[in-house]
Image (cartoon, rainbow, N blue to C red):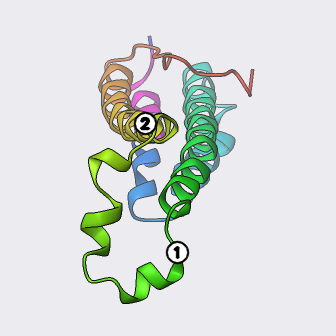
Amino acid sequence: METTSNKNLATFTHLSTLSQYFIPFGNYIFPILIWSSNKDKSEFINYTGKQVINFQLSVFLYSLILAVIAIPILIVTIFSNVSLNTVFYEENFMRNNFSIENISGIAIIAIIALLLFVGLKVAEFFLIIYASVKTSNGDQFKYPLTIPFIK
């Protein structure tokens, strides 16, 4: 049975990852600080800290992979058939060059990668909230599809 203090600290470790929306890299800095300063106090806090950090690193890796797929494909697809004269002198540039007929099969892969990225970020947000609720009740939560970087 975990103490209320340990449950609150473990819950705050999960919630500290939401600082990424306000502070760059806050989703890594704050959980690492909380975990490293309190991991010797409780096995529950130690487990929670490892899960949070592993999940954040996994999400970063998945995001990086999706970005490596999507960004170059979109850049090449957008600018492959467009000359600079067209960009600066044609009035209907957007309508002529970015219509549904000009989307190639490879661009669809990039669009799917972008949609997967958005889905990943939405799932990350809701999983953090769910993990916080489970942890506040004293349950150990294991994030799905997490790579165990820290064991």
Identity, as a three-letter code, of the amino acid under mark 2:
Ile
Q: Report which quarter residue 86 is drawn in.
A: bottom left
Residue 135 falls in image quadrant = top left
Q: Is 4 included in the stretch rendered in magenta? A: yes
Residue 42 in percent (x, y) is at 60, 25
Mark 2 or 1, nearer chain start: 1
Q: Quadrant of the C terminus?
A: top right
Please rate how many residues cluster around mark 1, counting C-alpha atoms within 10 Å: few if below 14, some from 14 to 19, many from 20. Answer: few
- In the image, what residue occupies the spot 31% across and 18% down? 137
Numbered range of the magenta stretch: 2-14
Q: Nearer the viewer, residue 23 or 83?
A: 83
Q: Position of residue 7 (x, y in %)?
A: 41, 28
**Residue under the image location 54 percent in, 18 percent down:** 145
Q: Secondary structure at mark 1?
A: loop
User: Whole-percent x and y of residue 6?
Assistant: 47, 30
Q: Which part of the image, by quadrant, shows the N terminus?
A: top left
Relative placement, left or right, of 62 versus 98 is right
For this rendering, which residue is in front, 151 or 34? 151
Residue 30: give x, y in percent of width and height: 55, 52
The mark total stands at 2
Q: Residue at x 69, y 21 (%)?
A: 148
**Could you say which disc has been placed on residue 108 in the image?**
2
Residue at coordinates 51% horizontally, 61% vertically from top-left? Answer: 81
Find disc 1 in the rendering and name its residue: 83
